């Protein structure tokens, strides 16, 4: 799994997840935003994923979105 270079707004985490799961990046972002309404460590998990998941290699294209 990689952070997306094409579908990124902040760090490409949601875009990378969308590419891995073959989903539209907007849908993954919407699910993340809606999950933030619930109590839990969503922001911390996002930050950890930002630090742990490498950025996609230059020129690589993953997924269909």
Image: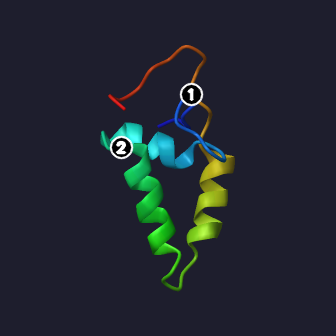
Q: How crowded is mark 1: few (under 14 residues within 10 Å), some or many (20 or more)?
A: some
Up-down relation of residue 34 to residue 50 (above or below) = below
Image mark for residue 24: 2
Q: Kindly report the distance in space between the C-alpha atoms of the residues bearing marks 1 and 2.
A: 17 Å
Mark 1 vs mark 2: give the one in front. Answer: 2
Q: Earlier in the sequence, mark 1 or mark 2?
A: 2
Tell me residue 12's x, y (percent): 58, 42
Up-down relation of residue 32 to residue 29 (above or below) = below
Q: Which residue is drawn at 36% across and 43% down?
A: 24
| Quadrant including the C terminus | top left
Q: Residues within 10 Å of mark 2 (few under 14, many from 20)?
A: some
Q: What kind of element bears circle 2?
A: loop
Q: Residue at x 43, y 45 (%)?
A: 25
Q: Residue at x 39, y 37 (%)?
A: 19
Query: In screen coordinates, is 2 left or right of 31?
Result: right
Image mark for residue 33: none
Tell me residue 42's x, y (percent): 56, 70
Q: What kind of element bears circle 1?
A: loop
Up-down relation of residue 39 to residue 59 (above or below) = below
- Residue to which mark 1 is pinned: 56
């Amino acid at each position: 799994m990689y952070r997306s270079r094409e579908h990124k707004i902040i760090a490409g985490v949601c875009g990378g997840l969308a590419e891995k799961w073959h989903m539209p990046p907007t849908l993954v972002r919407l699910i993340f935003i809606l999950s933030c309404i619930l109590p839990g460590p969503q922001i911390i998990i996002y930050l950890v994923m930002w630090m742990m998941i490498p950025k996609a290699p230059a020129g690589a294209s993953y997924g269909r979105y």
